[in-house]
Image (cartoon, helix red, strand yellow):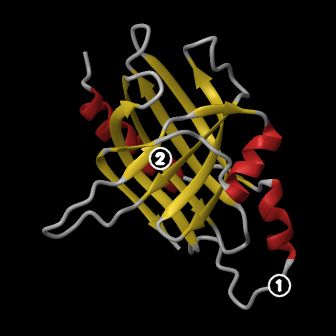
Amino acid sequence: MVSARSFIVLSLSALLGACSDGASRVMGPAVMAASAAPSLSRDRDDPKQSVTGAAEYIEPQIQQPEAYAMSAIRHTDGSVSGEVELFLALNGGIRIHGEVVCFAVLGNRANLAMRITRTNTPDAPTGTYLIWSVADNDSNGPHRVPDQSSGFETADGARATEHCASGVGVGAFAPIHGNLEVRN
């Protein structure tokens, strides 16, 4: 049996490898308009914003261990690429894999949405959207403050887009074990 911590390390390694091997890039509705504007620098492989890392915490609403690894990148042309691997220790272990469809960076926080591409639970079928938010608290130094994550919530495509743009409520934040990096 793989522990949640080992799962995070293995998943993050797989995600970073998959994203660097030409993973598909999707353009969410919120970024389509931004990508139409001309720019002086259009190097698609030079990320403008990103949200990456791995987290392990007790999910606030169900009080069960949850772990995930993610990589989300907004390219200079406005497109978004990324993947998420999620594990919940509920009902014998739920595993969900998805593609990041949109995200927004607001200071040290980010609102994200993914579309499920693989799952082992009928409660979150393929094609369902999940939304969540993270806070990168720069947890270095003597007064370490852990990074934080909300739980994942199901959404339709419209709510996913709205969440990325404005951070519709996704419940309480929980401190994590791991490291989340929000770069603007």
Q: Is residue 178 above or below residue 119?
A: below
**Residue 47 placed where, x, y %?**
56, 71
The residue at the point 46 percent across, 64 percent down is 182
The residue at the point 86 percent across, 68 percent down is 33
**Residue 120 placed where, x, y %?**
55, 14
Whether residue 13 is visible, yes or no, is no
Q: Secondary structure at mark 1?
A: loop
Query: On the image, which quarter does residue 49 sit in?
Result: bottom right
The disc placed on residue 38 is: 1
Task: Point out the tag, 2 or 1, that comes first from the N-terminus.
Answer: 1
* Residue that extends furthest to the left in the rendered view of this protein: 142
Graded by Cα atoms within 10 Å as few (under 14), some (14 to 19) or many (20 or more), the crowding at tag 2 reads many
Q: Is residue 181 above or below residue 54?
A: below
Query: CA gap, disc 2 to disc 1?
Result: 29 Å
Name the residue beneath numbered marker 2.
70
The residue at the point 64 percent across, 30 percent down is 117
Disc 2 marks which amino acid? Answer: Met
The residue at the point 42 percent across, 23 percent down is 88
